[in-house]
Amino acid sequence: MDFTYTETQGMIRDTLARFLADTYDFDARTKMIASEAGRDPAIWTALAQELGMLGAAFGEEHGGLGGGHIENMIVMEELGKVMAIEPYLPTVVIGGGALTAAGGAVADHMIPEIIGGNVIIGFAYAEPQGRYNLANLRTSAKKEGAGYVLNGHKSVVVAAPWATHLLVTARSGGSQSEADGVSLFLIEAGLPGIVRRDYPTVDGFRASEVYFENVSIPGGALLGGEGAALPMIEAIVDTATAAICAEACGVTERLHAGTLDYAKQRKQFGQEIARFQVLQHRMVDMFMEVEQAKSMTIMATLSLDKPAQDRMAAVSAAKAKISQGARFVGQNAVQTHGGIGITQELAIGHYFKRASMIENQFGSADHHLDRYEMLTLAE
Amino acid sequence: MDFTYTETQGMIRDTLARFLADTYDFDARTKMIASEAGRDPAIWTALAQELGMLGAAFGEEHGGLGGGHIENMIVMEELGKVMAIEPYLPTVVIGGGALTAAGGAVADHMIPEIIGGNVIIGFAYAEPQGRYNLANLRTSAKKEGAGYVLNGHKSVVVAAPWATHLLVTARSGGSQSEADGVSLFLIEAGLPGIVRRDYPTVDGFRASEVYFENVSIPGGALLGGEGAALPMIEAIVDTATAAICAEACGVTERLHAGTLDYAKQRKQFGQEIARFQVLQHRMVDMFMEVEQAKSMTIMATLSLDKPAQDRMAAVSAAKAKISQGARFVGQNAVQTHGGIGITQELAIGHYFKRASMIENQFGSADHHLDRYEMLTLAE
Amino acid sequence: MDMEFSAEDMTFREEVRRFIAENYPESLRAVQEEGEEMAKEDFLSWHRILAKKGWIAPAWPAEYGGPGWSATQRFIFSEEIAAADCVTIMPFGINMVGPVIYTFGTPEQKAHFLPRILSGDDWWCQGYSEPGAGSDLASLRTAAVRDGDDYIVNGQKTWTTMAQHADWGFFLVKTDRELKAQEAISFLLIDMKSPGVTVRPIITLGGEHEVNEVWLENVRVPISNRVYEENKGWTCAKFLLAHERTGIAGVARSKRGVEKIKAIARSEMDGERTLLQNPFFKRKISQLEIDLTALEFTELRSLAGEAAGKGPGPESSLLKIKGSEIQQRITELALEAVGHYGAPYFRGFGEGDNEHAIGPDYAHRAAPTYFNARKTTIYGGSNEIQRNIIAKMVLGL
Amino acid sequence: MDMEFSAEDMTFREEVRRFIAENYPESLRAVQEEGEEMAKEDFLSWHRILAKKGWIAPAWPAEYGGPGWSATQRFIFSEEIAAADCVTIMPFGINMVGPVIYTFGTPEQKAHFLPRILSGDDWWCQGYSEPGAGSDLASLRTAAVRDGDDYIVNGQKTWTTMAQHADWGFFLVKTDRELKAQEAISFLLIDMKSPGVTVRPIITLGGEHEVNEVWLENVRVPISNRVYEENKGWTCAKFLLAHERTGIAGVARSKRGVEKIKAIARSEMDGERTLLQNPFFKRKISQLEIDLTALEFTELRSLAGEAAGKGPGPESSLLKIKGSEIQQRITELALEAVGHYGAPYFRGFGEGDNEHAIGPDYAHRAAPTYFNARKTTIYGGSNEIQRNIIAKMVLGL
């Protein structure tokens, strides 16, 4: 048992932290979000080419640093600390994770492109009717010749407005919520028949509704077996869920630290509000949630390569706890700030917004408690 | 809309409060409980004969004061304030309620006996397998000649060791949890074949396991229609549930007041602990629970004569809220007292024990939330 | 003791319900359903309709233009207004400065201001909070210095709700530098069009422009616009605070809010069942309903006490605390209910876009409303302050 | 980073498990299942078996008789001990005064006391709390005055766990009336059979006799029984407090407790289904398990930090707070699970009664255990104190 970082891992964290401290302060982030594109592409390029950060989690055979889940955890936590809107999660964690799992020629081709910063991937998995059930799909992929024809509507595809590629779940067979018949495709984002409606999200990202209207895609776009991709998709989403747990650690750590700083300087009734015992104990409770979020994130991350049952139970336990913790820390950070906490002016409110979205992303606490029980308490 | 007591109701409350202040302090109660009998019969006699208190909730035609549910609420709240172990709930609220509902000769005979203090009734309704489901009965009443023969085992019959009579639910037909086939009997406690195993309860009452072994009872013992008593039993138990909500108001009020007193006098780190803001806010939260318990008790009590659906929803809403409040107030009273709160020496710990038992009596918060949803949110 | 409404009350309820059904502006309903910010005129249209009917100021004494209702009638009225999803009547004139003026004002002040509050001719805002003194009114720094028949006012206020529309504001200012805080405050009525008044927007988390900073630079205010005696403004402020807390429980609106959540949960699917059939989501709703019932009956007990001559005491802080917590929980449930569609954000983005909102109609405001609702435990004296008040005034701590 | 146990660790776990299976006294198991209070000999029987094996003091350095285990091995050992429902080894000698003596004691103290702690020949109790000074150790009043080679000790201690069995006690006493509290405290070892020592029982809510008052009247204590320097007892106390908090999370026992709740919920019926099939009861269990996992990994991170040379810091207060809350929730669930049969009370009533307990076996201790567990958030520094510690030491407030 060992909970320490390797030297390389420590370096990744420090390098990234320094870079973000220089480039990603609150004002810079606000400007990116307000810009036409909604991001600053130079940051992504720098992450790839100056820092080599996009390769941290990939194998050396593809030009990566030979890392994996722990490297993703480190990167996501640092990105969380500055509320980065960079598409690391869909591109590297999810897209990269799918490619690594699928292997073969497409991986050999695409992973170096990801590492080089030339590719951005949007994960088109959610559908209006599906809630958090990954198999509940109406989007269809009909075999036609050597390829497929895609039809359907995907909800809230984060980073889709920026994406070069889309990773799409679709039904190539079976009935609407059946485990069998689910396939996974990596396709170019600009194919004819792909219609997007773009919008910002409340927490600063850009996303799209994506409509597939008779989109012809090549057979080589298929990742994994036709109609047999659900287990792989579940593993990918678990990996992504662990990654946003790590992001939540960064976000809640800053919510806590920001609240502490504010409370030490803000005066009411003639003294710093940090001297009020009720607020002290509340900040202690926030601290305890942050610490437990870190513990659960490590637990879940170290479980990602376990057998599916164990992996799913571990990830659901972590996400349930962290959803609850993110709400607690976020709400109390705002409450302790008072009025200033609910304005756009201070970073704290924006951390709260991101924390609130993390709560339900890839499943609410209730969803994960359900799944945890199904796996461990079924009678 | 009117939430004030009538003059008579105010007098009942004041008279009872004065009497209990004189007779029922913590030491007196401790001695009663430790005595062989587990009670002081003189108190019951005085309540009946000196104060006329046992008639407050009965109609004038039976020699009562013409009151009803509100009088029960007043009495139970005062009894709660001193943690009285008097069998008012099973005898007057439950037994008296059943007799009033059934009417007829048995009521005309028995109610004056209750008012006179000559009768104590134990309510034998719970069974080992039944949890809070009133229809889940294995105790059987077989018709034999003009009467019935009882067989079965009743759990935790409070006041049974003192009882002159038992009010018994039994199955005269139907299958184990069926609504049809449930009958209600009021029988003498000393009939041949009734076997008791007596014990104290954790909160100071005496109770028994009651076993019926081929107990012959007369036909006149039947209250309500044979096999059709479930609606009446449900109404009686709702009345009883509202009554312990009132008792909970008395208990939690004292838990709160006792904590307040203690906090104002107890010093730590050089000041009264009442000056610690965390404890102040906690006592405010306790206060709010007590106030809300009072509101819900009034709401439930005033709903007892409404149609069954409305009555049940109101009582379940109240009991769920009060179960939660009783736990919150009890636990925090003990916590605020520290070590002394968990000894037998101080009253506070005993109030906590009673509050804890009230939590699950006639159904836990979860049970009542289930029932509330079934009545109001069924889809 | 009974909790039934009398036949007269029931008739009254019918009358109110019918009036709303027949008179509430359809155009306003459409704006509300879009979920966009209301224009000043939107608020005023409904205000004027109620004013014309004589129902705009339920709590005012009849002599000043109130309808002369009982506490129960006022309760019924507020229930029906909420049940019909009517826009909120801005409280600053009707519920706040109005009662201060008819209680403490001069005959001239009453004659001039009260009719204009009723009619909606004057839109009011409240100048209380200052930067660095949120709930701590005793440490105000905005100061008024006498100059002939005027005060010259300098300072800065913040969290001033709807000041962008305001014709008049009521302000707490210091009128004496020597005296202790509470003995040095006066209550001034300031024309927001006076030279030296600047209003700057504060944008809140959901993107709303509801609150403002108000800068006062050498603003000249006639002494005749001071309510009550100089340095006695604290008396007005305390009176108003107590007044503000009644009704702050928001029971009727929250009841309506719970119904809306149920409707959402009936239409959202959770696998093969509706979200309302999910036992845990259903449990959160039932727990909320029960907590709301407890709040409702606590408010009714408080109203009954009021009717019996006991003014709304410090225990009304309970209503504020529990009421605001419930309002927040409603918005939490809405956000949880809409799933993925909580994320898209539209305000101010792609305006002029005629397409329908992304996701179901009820989804696109869930997150901003949730964010915005965090204010309910902060404003009007934060819930921490309310607990301090109960600790001190009720528990004697 | 990885969280797997090494092959050596797995072998070690097997060895521990086998040893317990083969050596744990059957007679003790029977007493435990009855749920009655343990006699002194009951505790000692298992203590002596572990002592003989050399496993009684997992955390002690090998030179003083510890087994020389790694942190991971100690963790595994505690898990297995808990999983097998072994009686708790009294902590006062092994975990508390022992480490103080081998860290601060004289060679003579080490030579005399440590072997007797290991063997169980001496039963220890802790004389810290005083009436009027629960968690506030700085305001102690028990005083020791020098008289030749002795101290004369006068005062009163309370909450002294298991003092009724104790041969020795370690006491915090004031040795200087002039100095400030923390600079005036000394750490004395007192023979409980000394003239002037009186132990009086305190009966707690569940009817247990676990704690006592200890009266000290002119008790003569040789100066050689003082550990560390005079007036430096606070150093020992602080060391011991930090030591006491490790392991106080009680993860392994709570895991076992959750399993027991599951077993109860599998056997209790809730209508046609088991209680474990009730979604809300099941949810409380899963939430408890998840919170326990969070606590476990927080403890493991803390242990890893310790192994890397960071001593158990003030963040171990987190382990105390969350650990004690979880212990209480387990007892809450047990009481809720047993329904009606939580009410009957048997301790001390009808003793000699050979009949089986009323209701299912697991029911009759549910309420007393729930009541008794309220102590976990009070003792060892109440959870309020622990939050103060984190606020001060970790958050710098």
Image: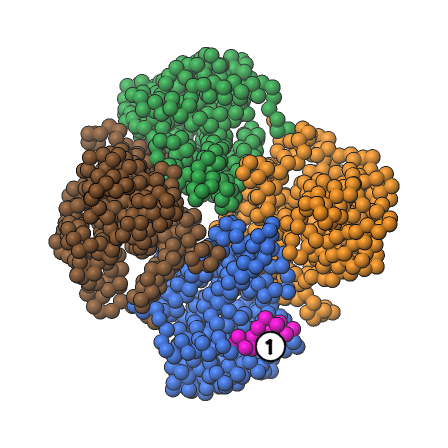
Chain colours: A blue, B green, C orange, D brown
- A31 drawn magenta: yes
- How many marks the image carries: the answer is 1
Residue situated in front as seen by the camera: B350 or D222: D222
* Span highlighted in magenta in the image: A20-34
Q: Quadrant of the C terminus of chain C?
A: top right
At label 1, the amino acid type is Arg
- Could you tell me which secondary element the residue under label 1 belongs to? loop
Let me know if residue D32 is in the magenta part.
Answer: no
Residue holding disc 1:
A39
Chain to which mark 1 belongs: A
Residue occupying image coordinates x 87% and y 41%: C108
Image x and y of residue B151, in percent: 31, 27
x 35%, y 35%: residue:
B343
Quick check: A36 left or right of B264? right
Few, some or many C-alpha atoms within 10 Å of disc 1 (few <14, some 14-19, many ≥20)?
many
Left or right? Give the position of A79 relative to C162.
left
Look at the magenta stretch and give its main secondary structure.
helix
Q: Is residue A223 above or below residue C271?
A: below
Which residue is at the front of the view, C280 or C180? C180
Q: For residue A196, say whether it is visible.
A: no
Residue B117 in view here: yes
Please state the horizontal and vertical placement of residue A100, each as a whole percent of the image: 41, 80
Q: Quadrant of the N terminus of chain C?
A: top right
Position of residue D215 measured from the top left corner of the image (x, y, whole percent):
27, 35
Q: Quadrant of residue A342?
A: bottom right
Residue displayed at 39% across by 76% down: A9
Q: Please tell me which residue is depicted at 81% across the width and 35% down the height of the picture.
A: C62
User: Is D152 positioned to the left or the right of B75 in the image?
Assistant: left
